[in-house]
Image: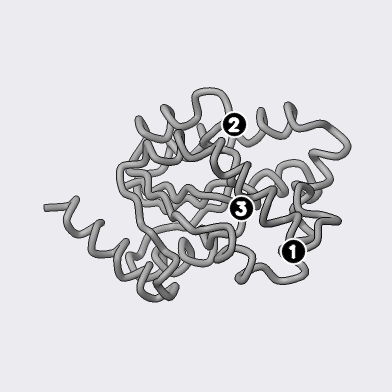
Amino acid sequence: MRLYLIGYMGCGKSTVGRKVARFAHLRFVDTDSQVESREGGSVADVITYQGEEYFRTVERAVLESTAAEDDIVVSTGGGLPVWADNMEVISQLGVSVYLRRSPANILSRLSPYGRQKRPKFRGLNDEELLAFMTSHMAEREPLYSKADITIDCDSMTDSEVIDCIIREIRNLKR
């Protein structure tokens, strides 16, 4: 099984993905971490010095590399599903799970480091960040909503989200 977690920046894909992988005895891959490993720098640095188009090309190569593994949980970058035909590729490769959260919920989850490491969030106060996320998420929603499974996470703890994903995986295996 290949399980792809999609959703907006800061929605918990990596945190939840690691725990789901551990519980289900699957390998965990974070596409942002893979890009950083390949490029020898942070996602922010790759975008700053090489450009977003270059970053998206490397990110796509990482996505394509997941096709070689069968038992994997993949945490995608927030923009990966909305670039080119990546959502279609994800759908062909495995099962996609959209972790849907409101901008206010994401803001409450973000640490100062979490804000700083995301170039699009840098320098924005809370009000500006909420406005940005609301607009940006609305643009991405049509593609995110193509996921096989959508989990509305706002009223759930990470443990409840993980339990929900595990239940869905079990239902798919039947």
- Residue type, numbered disc 3: Met
Element on which disc 2 rests: helix
The residue indicated by pointer 3 is: 9
- Residue type, numbered disc 2: Ala
Q: CA distance from mark 2 to mark 1?
A: 34 Å
The residue indicated by pointer 1 is: 126
Task: Classify mark 2: residues with Cα within 10 Å, few (<14), some (14-19) or many (20+).
Answer: some
Closest to the camera, between mark 3 and mark 1, is 1
Horizontal and vertical percent position of residue 158? 44, 72
Horizontal and vertical percent position of residue 28? 48, 57
- Residue type, numbered disc 1: Asp
Residue nearer the viewer, 27 or 73 = 73
Of mark 3 and mark 2, the one earlier in the sequence is 3
Horizontal and vertical percent position of residue 8? 56, 50
Of mark 2 and mark 1, the one earlier in the sequence is 2
Element on which disc 1 rests: helix
Q: CA distance from mark 3 to mark 1?
A: 15 Å
Task: Classify mark 3: residues with Cα within 10 Å, few (<14), some (14-19) or many (20+).
Answer: many
Tell me which corner region of the image, top left, top right, bottom left or bottom right, holds residue 169.
bottom left
The residue indicated by pointer 2 is: 61
